Amino acid sequence: MRNTITAATAACLFALPAVAQDQFAIPVTAQILPGWEREDGTRMAAIHLSLDPGWKTYWRAPGDAGIPPSFDWSGSRNLHSVSVAWPRPKVFDQNGMRSIGYENELVIPLTLARSHAGQPISIDLDMNIGICSDICVPHDVSLKAMLDGTATTPTPAIAAALAQTPYSAREAGVTRATCKIEPTKDGLRIEARVTAPSAGGAEVIVIEPGLPDVWVSEADTRRTGNDIIAVSEMIHVEGGSIAIDRSAVRLTVLGSSHAIDIRGCTAG
């Protein structure tokens, strides 16, 4: 359950139970929201980040100007798996570059599955995030919490964050999602085409190739009738060849009213 990136450590947050305390006055504080028990035996919890005014942090695919988050759950106990649900992020223009993330406050819902049913979950999370104002730096967060309550009433902050997660392709009325892929001098060019009703305002498509060592450029997105079209370049970070599995490609449409999460595309 370890997802890492290469980044310098800027500072550490030392955790009391469920709350991270910042001894270096970095403008972010964090805590685990314990959440509630679900009927299927999993537990809904959340990471709650509070940022000082003017600061922001980043989404899972942060754009060229951002730092992607990473999670290390390996110190946790009685934790079989974690599913992270990201609320709809905002698109920021930063020194002529696009970044994708959140400002002021972020609640990240977590669905936690136990290794042993009916027993408490001990959370020991090391998280690396990017925080940005005039400068952008990586930042380490350490959080600990013992989740052993039996409450079944949803926590309002977590429920609100879940309500902001993207629609599925079916929920958003997507009727087609294709990816046309062509070789270039340095890698591949991908043209994604999504047929769907408007998500509101100036839409942006984020393309994730499903490959950890492939860099994807900021997509040039436009809408033509019922189609949203996005074009990106893909380059292997170590100069190697790229083999794209279209079923692993993830397309996220970000609009002013909602977002759409599309898993996989067909040949265009």
Image (cartoon, helix red, strand yellow):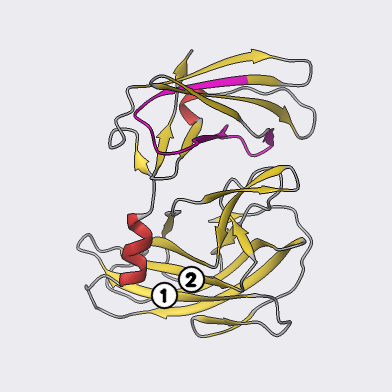
Q: Name the spot of residue 238 as percent of width and height, x first.
A: 79, 33
Q: Residue at x 42, y 80 (%)?
A: 146
Structural crowding at the residue carrying mark 1, measured as other residues with C-alpha within 10 Å and reported as few (<14), some (14–19) or many (≥20): many
Which of the two residues, 175 or 187, is positioned nearer the viewer here? 175
Please say if the residues under marks 1 and 2 sit with CB atoms less than 8 Å apart: yes
**Magenta region: which residues?**
190-216
Question: Was residue 161 drawn as part of the magenta stretch in this picture?
Answer: no
Q: Name the spot of residue 80 as percent of width and height, x first.
A: 41, 60
Mark carried by residue 33:
1
Amino acid residing under circle 2: His
Question: Was residue 212 drawn as part of the magenta stretch in this picture?
Answer: yes
Answer left or right for 152 relative to 182.
Answer: left
Q: Quadrant of residue 107?
A: bottom left
Amino acid residing under circle 1: Leu
Extreme residue in the left direction: 39
Secondary structure at numbered mark 2: strand
Disc 2 target residue: 48
Q: Residue at x 65, y 34 (%)?
A: 218
Answer left or right for 243 relative to 267.
Answer: right
